[in-house]
Each structure stands twice: as structure tokens, then as C-alpha cells.
Image (cartoon, rainbow, N blue to C red):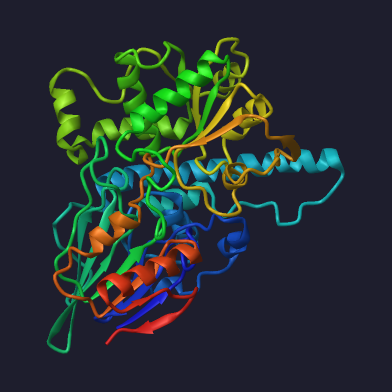
């Protein structure tokens, strides 16, 4: 068996791994690189001959896990893409949205470059087109949790709930070779325990090899003084303070899970009278459509969400919530005279409508930019969060005068304690643990924790590294 690491190695985005085992070549995830430093990798030809890949397995629908699938299909991949039903529906939204955003961004840049009289640094083409997306979606095969999926006679896959976003999965691959069966577990993104709406992460008692994420490998969500279990109180404090001061609360939002979790919390706060009665906008067509996917896939909900539904209150709806689809509706938000809570994508501020709201509010001391998810290095969101006094938005520099806040407990990722809890569920040491999907310092630090506390073999692989699995 051979495992090759093709993304999210000593950095966060671009998750992609290739397993050659049992006579099959299997791609686990095929994500887009989003850190500025690694964007050029998105344009490189597939490091594997696409026609020789037998199947792809998708852990979940975030762009850094599925975003290069259309490009792979465009290069000749003709195998199935196995994913849960909820992941398949969300991936359709995300990939179509990405194709549209790419086209819009290129059109905007062309206009700006013509106005400025300069040429673009990179070719003004998209990574993939809506046609590529449609061809990719036709390759999806929907699978259920806990039901074995046959890759070939010697390899099967089982999807387990990851607790990260709706439909997210950890993938357990079972490989029969030379009379033995080996279990490989790919964690995908591991969620937190006791989050609203979706179920807790699955745990395993046995695995021969583990590929595990390490986004928060050296941090706990309460390291910054917040009560990890008290996200509503943090939201109430920030929203109340900002609204009373006459400003807007602008929240760069990931369209899937974070947007729905915020709707859930804000709705409960309004019902309880813990925040002012102000307009709340979800200004993201994809996030709105994703909320509808949540309504269709209630089979993924946890017991608390079902109790709300049983009482006649759907957890993702309240009177002050306005969902804005059109560009005109989006522009109208900027003309409001009263304070508001504005949620918009993208979550790392790399594209989308959030840039317009940042431009309108980032120079206002009375407004708050509130981050509720991980900000990868090199992204606009990370620059703002790191305290840069000035940032570039839409080709122009803007002074950062707004209040900058962050809530860590809303993250969809388990922290260091959660990762060690998940790994510690194994009753015996695996032959090897591979740490991926984390900045280098986070992955290396978690590796040290695993060695010191568990005395297990652990590796932080390099990009494109190949490992022979005994």
C-alpha cells in the first residue's frame, strides 16, 4: 500500500490524499488551495493521471476539500465520487457558487485593470466552468453513514459522522491484501462535541493508519479567555455593545454550518431578549440555499434540534431574519440608517459579498468585524484578525478602525483537547498517525503532544510525499 499526500500538508487548505491499495487508486478529497502562498497549485495539472484514478471519496463539501473536483473531471477523471447525500447537495451549491464567483471576480478585475491601464499578472480565466461542475455532479454516488461501500473486491469504505458540517464524514477504508485486512481512517475535519444542530464526532477503537487533521493542534478554544461552552453570551455581549454604539456587526460567515449555527444562536438570543431587536441579514445566496439543504436533511440533526422541531419551532428561522439573494438587496443593506447584524460570505474574506460590507464598515470605529471561524494565513480575514492597520479591498487600501472581535467556540474544528480525545479513543496504537490540514507550527506541536502523552508513532508529511504502508 502506498499513501501520497497531495495537499493540506503543513498548511490548512487543499486537502487531497491518494491511496494505492488492493489494486485500486483512490483519491480522498480533492480540495482547493486558498492560502495566497499556495494559490498557484490550483492551476497545476493533476499530480496523478486522472484517468487512472478508480474512485474519489469526499469527506465533506467545503471548498478546500472538494473545490478541485471539477478540474479533475475536466482533465479526464471518470470514476465515481462517493459522498453522503447531504454532502452531495451542499457540494452542488459550493461548486456552482465557486464557478460563479470566479467569473464575477475575473470580470471585475478586467474592468479595474482597464481603468488602471495595466495587465493582469495571471491569465484571466477560471479554474473551471459551470459545465465542468455539472459533469462533476453527475459522478456523485450518494452513500449512507455506517453502510459499507464497495470500491473493488478488496477495498471498501465506511462513512462515519464527523460532527463538522452537515453530512461531513470520517472515512474508514478497509483493504484486504495478502490475507490480512488493514483499516485506514481519514478523519476529514473533526468537529466539536455538543454543538447545535448536528451530531457529535464519531470515534474509533481500532485503526492501523490514521490521517488526522490538526487545524487547532496547539490551541484550545478557551485559551483566549472565552468560555468555550458559552457562545451565546459572547455573541450577546458583542452584538449588544455594537448596536448600542450605533454600529453594525459584520460577520464573515462560512456558508455552511457557521451561518446556520449563528442563525440558531441569534434567534434564541432574540427570543430571550438578550440582544436588541435589530435587523439580521444573511447576505449570501449560497448560505441561504445551504439553509434549505439543512431543512431537507433533518436525518443529520441531533436530539436538541429535533426537540425544537417537535415543539413547533424550526431552529433556523426567526422574524427579524432577512435572507438577501439579489445584488440589489445586498446593496440596500449598505444604505440602512439603523444598526444591523450582517452575515456574508466568504468566511475568510477571500471573495464574495463580505468584501463590500467590510469596505463599508472597516473604517467605522463604532462597527465591529466579528470572526467566528478559522482564518488561514495569507487571507484577508487573517490580515484583519492579526491587527494589520491597513488592508487592501477591491484594489484599494483601507484603514482598519472598526473593532475586531473573535469567538473561538463557534469553530467547526475540534481544538487540541478535542483532537487528543478523538485519537485517544483507539484502544491500541496505530502503526502510524499522519497529521495534516494544519499550519506547520500547529501540526508539529500536536505531533509533540501525541509523542509525549501517548508515545505513538506520528508524522507530519510534506507536500507530495509518498509513504509505503507496511
- Compared with 187, 131 (above or below) is above
Question: Residue placed at 12% from the left, 87% from the top?
Answer: 179
Q: State the residue in front, 398 or 309.
A: 398
Residue 202's x, y, as percent? Answer: 19, 54
- Compared with 152, 399 (above or below) is above
Quadrant in which the N terminus appears: bottom left
Q: Is residue 386 left or right of residue 299?
A: right
Quadrant in which the C terminus appears: bottom left
Residue 369's x, y, as percent? Answer: 55, 31
Q: Is residue 61 left or right of residue 7?
A: left
The image quadrant that residue 400 belongs to is top right
Instruction: Look at the image and tell me whether residue 159 can be seen.
Output: yes
The image quadrant that residue 114 belongs to is top right
- Compared with 200, 74 (above or below) is below
Question: Residue placed at 20% from the left, 56% from the top?
Answer: 160
The image quadrant that residue 331 belongs to is top right
Residue 441's x, y, as percent? Answer: 49, 65
Q: State the residue in front, 395 or 120.
A: 395
* Total numbered circles: 0
Residue 401's x, y, as percent? Answer: 67, 30
Q: Is residue 408 left or right of residue 348?
A: left
Q: Is residue 180 left or right of residue 140?
A: left
Q: Residue furthest front?
A: 225
Q: Residue furthest right?
A: 117
Instruction: Look at the image and tell me whether residue 281 can be seen.
Output: no
Amino acid at each position: 500500500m502506498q499513501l501520497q499526500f497531495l495537499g493540506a500538508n503543513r498548511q490548512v487548505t487543499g486537502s487531497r490524499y491518494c491511496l494505492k491499495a488492493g489494486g485500486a487508486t483512490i483519491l480522498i478529497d480533492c480540495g482547493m488551495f486558498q492560502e495566497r502562498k499556495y494559490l498557484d497549485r490550483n492551476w497545476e495539472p493533476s499530480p496523478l493521471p486522472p484517468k487512472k484514478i478508480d474512485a474519489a471519496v469526499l469527506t465533506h463539501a467545503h471548498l478546500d476539500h472538494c473545490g478541485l473536483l471539477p478540474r479533475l473531471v475536466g482533465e479526464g477523471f471518470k470514476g465515481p465520487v462517493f459522498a453522503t447525500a447531504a454532502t452531495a447537495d451542499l457540494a452542488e451549491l459550493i461548486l456552482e457558487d465557486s464557478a460563479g464567483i470566479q467569473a464575477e471576480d475575473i470580470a471585475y478585475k478586467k474592468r479595474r485593470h482597464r481603468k488602471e491601464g495595466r495587465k493582469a499578472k495571471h491569465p484571466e480565466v477560471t479554474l473551471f466552468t459551470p459545465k465542468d461542475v455539472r459533469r462533476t455532479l453527475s459522478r456523485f454516488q450518494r452513500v449512507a453513514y455506517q453502510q459499507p461501500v464497495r470500491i473493488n473486491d478488496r477495498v471498501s469504505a465506511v462513512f462515519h459522522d464527523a460532527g463538522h458540517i452537515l453530512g461531513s464524514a470520517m472515512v474508514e477504508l478497509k483493504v484486504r491484501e495478502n490475507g490480512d485486512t488493514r483499516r485506514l481512517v481519514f478523519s476529514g475535519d473533526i468537529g466539536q462535541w455538543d454543538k447545535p444542530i448536528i451530531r457529535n464526532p464519531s470515534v474509533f477503537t481500532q485503526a492501523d493508519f490514521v490521517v488526522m487533521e490538526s487545524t487547532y493542534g496547539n490551541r484550545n478554544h478557551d485559551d483566549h479567555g472565552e468560555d468555550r461552552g458559552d457562545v451565546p453570551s459572547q455573541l450577546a455581549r458583542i452584538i449588544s455593545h455594537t448596536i448600542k454604539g450605533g454600529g453594525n456587526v459584520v460577520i464573515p460567515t462560512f456558508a455552511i454550518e457557521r451561518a446556520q449555527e449563528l442563525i440558531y444562536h441569534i434567534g434564541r438570543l432574540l427570543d430571550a431578549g438578550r440582544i436588541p431587536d435589530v435587523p439580521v441579514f444573511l447576505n449570501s445566496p449560497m448560505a441561504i440555499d445551504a439553509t434549505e439543504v439543512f431543512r431537507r436533511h433533518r436525518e443529520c440533526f441531533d436530539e436538541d434540534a429535533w426537540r425544537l422541531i417537535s415543539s413547533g419551532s424550526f431552529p433556523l428561522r426567526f422574524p427579524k431574519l432577512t435572507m438577501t439573494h439579489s445584488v440589489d438587496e445586498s446593496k440596500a443593506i449598505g444604505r440602512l440608517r439603523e444598526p444591523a447584524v450582517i452575515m456574508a460570505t466568504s468566511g475568510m474574506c477571500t471573495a464574495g459579498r463580505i468584501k463590500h460590507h467590510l469596505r463599508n464598515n472597516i473604517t467605522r470605529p463604532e462597527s465591529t468585524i466579528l470572526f467566528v471561524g478559522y482564518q488561514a494565513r495569507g487571507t484577508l480575514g487573517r490580515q484583519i484578525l492579526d491587527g494589520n492597520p491597513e488592508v487592501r479591498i477591491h484594489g484599494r487600501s483601507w484603514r482598519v478602525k472598526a473593532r475586531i472581535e473573535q469567538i473561538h467556540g463557534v469553530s467547526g474544528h475540534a481544538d487540541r483537547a478535542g483532537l487528543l480525545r478523538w485519537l485517544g479513543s483507539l484502544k491500541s496504537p496505530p502503526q502510524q498517525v499522519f497529521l495534516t490540514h494544519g499550519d506547520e507550527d500547529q501540526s508539529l506541536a500536536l505531533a509533540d503532544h501525541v509523542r509525549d502523552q501517548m508515545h505513538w508513532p506520528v508524522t507530519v508529511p510534506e507536500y507530495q510525499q509518498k509513504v509505503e504502508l507496511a
